[in-house]
Amino acid sequence: MSTQTGYLLIADISGYTQFLTTSEMDHANPILHSLLGVLIEQVGDPLHFWKTEGDAVLAYSTRQDFPSGETFLTICENLYNAFALRRQDIIANTTCTCNACANVGGLDLKVITHHGQFEEMQLGPVKDFSGADVVLVHRMAKTNVVEATGVRSYALFSEAAANAMDIKGIVEPFSQDIEHFGEVSMKVYDLAKSWERLRANRERHFLTKEDGVWTFLHHFDAPIAVVWEALVAPELKLKWMNRVQEITVDSPQGRLGNGSGYHCSHELADFFYRITDWEPFDYFSTCIQDPARTGVSLPETYQLTQTNTGTDLRYTMGQATDAEGNRSEISEQEVSAFLAEFWAASFSDLDEQLKASK
């Protein structure tokens, strides 16, 4: 056996027992398989699939350079979003009146996470984990969060996980006495509320390649979540953005997302851009100011696609316009010429850093 240190995650479908005991099995089982399947699809490096346990998908990570708490929270949100969309599709696409199909709306999701140590065991062809921290994360799935907070769709982080992820400022405190562990401090994050807030009155600002005036393509030999964080986290961007000396971020909502603004101090000029559309880990769009022409800005879209060998990035720049909508082709030519050299050098550095972190 070998001892590992890292994260343990359980994506647990709530309402499962009542659903099974009040539903016809010939319809209930396919529904649950579909919901569990979409959760498994969301588990990818730096998380690793562990196993399923009835109504839950278990995953873990032993990466020392696991993405930040911001990115981990996004992983939890994506698990919930995928579950909610699949549940919505099942409801919308069935006319069956059996109890199983009628009760799908009563199913929900909670995501439990702990950071600690666990022993890796090989039991014949099966890999499993044991240890006190493994027991604790399972016990956390049985707490009374809903009764105490009223939050039904939630991510629950142990204090150890919250500290490791540095997300204490955007989650709510919760504690409960757990047998053999005493009073356990935890943090609660409302996944359903986050889903509603991020999509409320949302405008799309997505550029296809055909929408743009210039596109740059690059392939990274790294998982999509790792590439996403490198592209958006200011402390990581500073490590690979060529000749950039300082990066500051203004996030009015306390998290990176729509409305967040970046200031990148390059050796040649200061660049200011703001996020206009945010769809982790699929794409994000920004509007960047032309540092050479006051009042002229350009839209941008960064789209990521997971492949068998890593992640493809498509960067597309749109038409440059001033406040009145007048196009500036000279701005487009100068910015694209700068970015062609900048992205080539910067992404080459990022490639080396991602390879070194494996």
Image (cartoon, grey):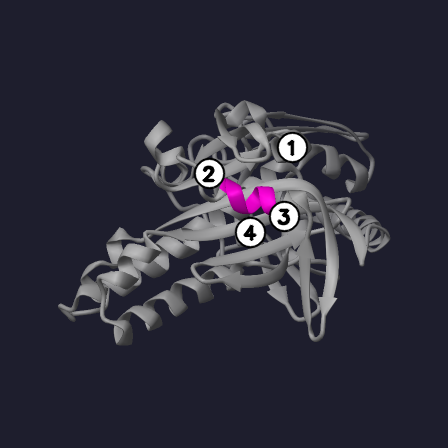
Residue segment shown in magenta:
135-140
Query: Nearer the observer, disc 3 or disc 2?
Result: 3
The residues bearing labels 3 and 2 have C-alpha atoms spaced at a distance of: 60 Å
The residue sitting at 36% across, 65% down in the picture is 32
Sequence-first disc among 3 and 2: 3
Label 2 residue SS: loop
Tell me residue 167's x, y (percent).
59, 29
Secondary structure under the numbered disc 4 in the rendered image: loop
Question: Which numbered disc, 1 or 4, marks the residue closer to the eye?
Answer: 1
- Residue 131 appears at what percent x and percent y? 69, 48
For the residues labelled 2 and 4, the Cα–Cα distance comes to 33 Å
The CA span between labels 3 and 4 is 28 Å
Magenta: main secondary structure equals helix
* Amino acid type at mark 4: Phe
Q: Nearer the viewer, residue 91 or 131?
A: 131
- Indicate which disc, 2 or 4, sits on the residue closer to the N terminus: 4
From the image, state whether disc 2 or disc 1 is nearer to you: 1
Near-viewer residue (234 or 336):
234
Q: Is residue 252 above or below residue 214?
A: above
